[in-house]
Image (spheres, rainbow, N blue to C red):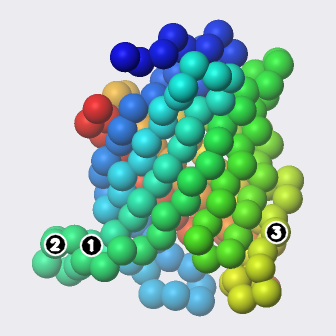
Amino acid sequence: MEPELHPDLEPLKFLLGTWEGAGVGGYPTIEDFNFGQEMSFTHIGKPFLIYTSRTWMIEKDGTLGRPLATETGYWRPRPDHRVELTLAHPTGIVEIYLGEVAFTRVELQTDVVARTESAKEVTGGTRLYGLIGEDLGWAYDMAAVGRELQSHLSAQLKRVA
């Protein structure tokens, strides 16, 4: 039995569900690549969304390859169409994003990035999520390893559940 959606989640309800698709990635310090992704937004009746994402390499022949990244977090709506996003990565990075929701589009930028001693140096990021027709598109710009903010990942996903 699915719990009733908390009224504070109304502006973010377009994200609910499981999304799958493909994207592209690159950065000056790595070779460009294609990836497959599964992204999920769920709720338990409280005023936050539970978020998970997993990605895999797409090989040159189109098959899924090795796992790439995973992240998990919580989307917390705030008054006046603002939103907070907390993200944790198993690579030792934790991020807090602040942003705004406008219709079916969310723009976020980092407020805090913390990392463990062994984690890659990431100093900031911006994220954009939004509906493109019935698909969910998203993009991530990253500042890392001494580089300024620039494009890193983007994908277009279809709702599968």
Mark closest to the chain's N terminus, 3 or 1: 1
Q: Which residue is located at x 59 percent, y 71 percent?
A: 90
Return the disc, 1 or 2, that comes first in the chain's sequence: 1
Which residue in the structure is indicated by mark 2?
63
Which residue is painted at 73% across and 63% down in the image? 94
Query: Left of 18 or right of it: where is 90?
Result: right
Residue at left 59%, top 85%? 28
| Residue located beneath label 1 in the image | 58
Residue 152: x, y in percent?
57, 69
Q: Quadrant of the N terminus?
A: top left
- Is label 1 in a helix, a strand or a loop? strand
Mark 3, other Cα within 10 Å: few <14 / some 14–19 / many ≥20: some
Crowd class of label 1 (few under 14; some 14 to 19; many from 20; radius 10 Å): many
**Mark 3 against mark 1, which lies toward the viewer?**
3
Residue type marked 2: Thr
> Is the Cβ of the residue at disc 1 closer than 8 Å to that at disc 2?
yes
Image position, residue 100 (x, y; %): 74, 32
Is tag 2's residue or tag 3's residue first in the polypeptide sequence? 2
Q: Quadrant of residue 121?
A: bottom right
Task: Return the x and y of residue 85 as percentages of the image width and height.
Answer: 71, 44
Relative depth, front residue between 113 and 104: 113
Q: Position of residue 91 (x, y in %)?
A: 61, 76
Q: Is residue 36 above or below residue 104?
A: below
Q: Is residue 158 visible?
A: yes
Kindly identify which residue carries mark 3.
114
